[in-house]
Amino acid sequence: MAILDIQVVATSLPAIQNALGVAPDAMSWVQTSYLIAEIIAIPLTGWLTRALTMRWLFVAAMALFTASSVGCALSESFTMLVSFRTLQGFAGGALIPPVFAAVFILFAPRMQGIATTIAGVMAVLAPTVGPIVGGWTTQTYSWHWLFLINVVPGLIACIFTPFLLPRQQSYISDILKLDSFSLFLMATGLASLVIGLKQAPRDGWLSLLCVALLSLTILSGLAFGWRTFKARYPIVELSTLRARSFAVGCAMSFCLGVGLFGSVYLMPVFLAFVRDRNALEIGSVMLVAGIEQLATAPLAVALESRMDGRLLTAVGFGTFAVGLGLNAFETPDTDFNEMFWPQLIRGAAIMFCLLPPTRLALGGLSQSQIPDASGLFNMMRNLGGVIGIALIDTILYGRTSIHADALRARLIAGDATAAQAIRLDPGLFATRRAAPIDAAAEAYLRPMIEKAAFAASANEAWLLLACFALLAALLVPFAWKTNPQRPGKPG
């Protein structure tokens, strides 16, 4: 629910904008407020788990998520919606790590692969099915139901969770040990990073606002790291990063977030702008990867229990890089058929990019370390998604005008390959002499030039995502081989 909610809302932002009368340049805050709150909440889950126990943390977070979903549905103003989205994001961030931590705490080693796969399928399938679910819901009912669909599952989870999760000793007194200044530094650093990355495509990376925000991120991050290592009761146990396999696993999780969330963001943008597809059509195209992920999950479980996780991880990220790279040859005519095989390859690879790296990162840690480590591990994937989307925006909205100017200049010079790139009728171009384009021709050619330029920029973005996946594959040799025994027991 927490992961799905990001993508469900994405395809329906125009409907929400029209309903609430929001300016187009302000609509990104509907998503940004959620992401900022979620990223801030994820590292806190280790501390909250110790204070409340996993059982009551899950109940409290689910109750807040459900209540804030109702608040979003009933919002009558933009400010009200963003406020409830912030609460919803915080609750969603608190829900994600306990799911993965529970795998290693509640299940025996022989069952951990299956449990991790089930959790992983939900985590990576949600961004894939989200667009079609959101588009269908808004088109069939209204945008309010994007949030109301969370109510019934949320209430069921709140009622049955206390009976399903085991009792653990709580340390309520730990609430009083909260290092509030560290929390402020973490919130400031993460918020300024996200906001800076969101503003960079619009204002430029070297604008005064972006430089100030990113500088604040660095200063807050350094201060937070220093204070956390010195604190008697740290909010986040950064010392876990001293375990090499966990540190490498976090880097892989970051790279996966860049490729996974980046590709899920880039495909709808391309299909909507270049191919003029609606939300339902875009969701139908993107189902290919989701179906392949489900089909590959049993194989991932079987191989994970029999083969070295490092080998599976390397193959997974290598294959993922190929699938991303194959999308870097898009043209204005690219549609379902051309996107089918790259999606199929990526869908087959994603489970191997999630399951074995999770075991490599968390499998060698003790049970007391897992709650904090799981929070960091999941935060890195979300952080990778935020940074990946920001980098994609920088390429799309920074490079498209450059490609458009180059295509226009080639057309003026009489370059036939430029005419072919924008899908101009060769008969019209063959009879034209090299000369400046008049107003009528400019109006006729502008949409074709813009779409071809956008496709060229999208290809560069796909190559960037492929590079991050390849980087993750190159990091695999630095991880230790995980002992297939229960974490925390020597052997």
Image (cartoon, rainbow, N blue to C red):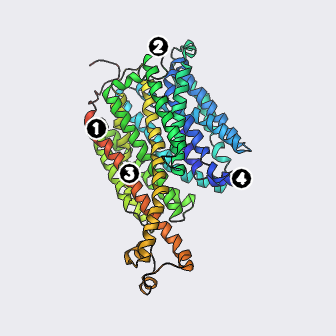
Relative image position of residue 404 (x, y in whole percent) = 46, 66
Mark 3–mark 2 distance (CA, rounded to whole Å): 41 Å
Task: Name which quarter of the figure residue 176 lies in.
Answer: top right
In the visual, does 344 lie left or right of 310? right
* Any part of residue 94 in sight: no
Is label 1 in a helix, a strand or a loop?
helix
Tag 2 secondary structure: loop
* Placement of the N terminus among the 4 image quadrants: top right
Q: Does the residue at mark 4 contact the one at mark 1 (Cβ under 8 Å)?
A: no
Q: Secondary structure at mark 4?
A: helix
Q: Are marks 1 and 3 in contact (CB under 8 Å)?
A: no
Identified by mark 2, the residue type is Arg
What residue does disc 1 label?
Answer: 476
Residue pointed to by mark 2: 232
Question: Which comes sooner in the sequence, label 4 or label 3?
Answer: 4
Tell me the distance, in whole angstroms, between the alpha carbons under discs 1 and 3: 19 Å
User: Which comes before the other along the chain, label 4 or label 1?
Assistant: 4
